Image (spheres, rainbow, N blue to C red):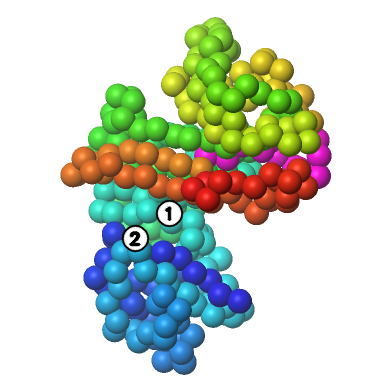
Amino acid sequence: MMTHWTVNPYEEHRPLLEAISLRIPSAPRAFLRQLCKKQRVFIDDHLATADTLVSTGQKISIKKSLRTEEFITASQLVPRQILYEDEQCMVINKPAGLAVHHAHGHTDDLQLHVQAFLHRRGNDFRTAPVHRLDIGTSGPVLFGKGRAAISQLGKMLMDHQAEKYYLALVQGETPQQGELCSAVPAKGKIKEARTGYQRLACSGGYSLLELTLETGRKHQIRYQLAEAGWPIAGDLRYKGPTTNDLSRPFLHCHRLLFPQPETGQPLQINCELPDDLKPLLTTLGITLPPTY
């Protein structure tokens, strides 16, 4: 069994030992050096030394051990959770069941994990998410590194320079594509909301949709789909069907697009469908297109 991840721009041209330390900061450098010496670390499936320089896009793999797993747990983030990182920002894969930031009734959240992880690295600057996902929704969350980056990224989102694409499995056979336009409850008021959708597959009385938000209301996708008569599988709050022992809504943000804060270069961050959602698609005989 292997732990593996893809090198990102923040790790570009660093020695392998340093690149691993950035992903598992609780592990002593001496321990990581021994991993390399004992031929337990690979770059693109080839053995590599501690001093080998890494490049963006390469795959780093480490043979699993109880000790390595202990250091990963202590680091607060699993290496593969870091989907992207540069000097200004990080994109972290949020699991379902974890709040993005402090929420009533929850003592744990992703922001705490990221701040603890950076502290382990020796980075004590402030970090914060610049958008949110529901507790029951999985997918990428963009964090700013430092107050200036947080402010800049926040303004970028307010100016609608970022896009999020979601996958949802809903009850019923939907049209091939369309737009949901309706009023939804938002912060004690009723506000207009718009959500575009495209059907990717249909089987067994369910439709797999890709959705994009044109407005950003709380629970917008869940509320509008239920109102349209297509509740999300596993979404008990909005009377979605329970099947395959699904313990949360089948809603996953699978793609995040935003401009790099310093250069303005368009970035596309993809986030694979998590393992807890895949079995239901298999049961229904639905196969995701290759680009998803």
* Alpha carbons under labels 1 and 2: distance apart: 8 Å
Give the quarter of the image for residue 65.
bottom right
The residue carrying mark 2 is 8
Residue at image point 81% right, 39% down: 243
Residue 251 covered by magenta stretch: yes
* Residue 191: x %, y % from top left: 51, 9
Q: In this orientation, does residue 25 appear?
A: no
In the rendered structure, which amino acid carries the disc numbered 2? Answer: Asn
The residue carrying mark 1 is 83
Q: Residue furthest left?
A: 263
Question: 181 left or right of 92?
Answer: right
Q: Residue furthest front?
A: 176
Residue at image point 33% right, 38% down: 258
Secondary structure under tag 1 reads strand
In the rendered structure, which amino acid carries the disc numbered 1? Answer: Leu
Q: Is residue 160 above or below residue 165?
A: above
Residue at image point 27% right, 77% down: 53
Residue at image point 61% right, 76% down: 1
Q: In this picture, which residue range is highlighted in magenta? A: 242-253
Q: Is residue 227 above or below residue 287?
A: above
Quick check: marks 1 and 2 in contact, CB under 8 Å?
Answer: yes
Q: Nearer the viewer, residue 113 or 288?
A: 288
Tell me if mark 2 has few (under 14), some (14-19) or many (20+) residues whose alpha carbon lies within 10 angstroms of its own: some
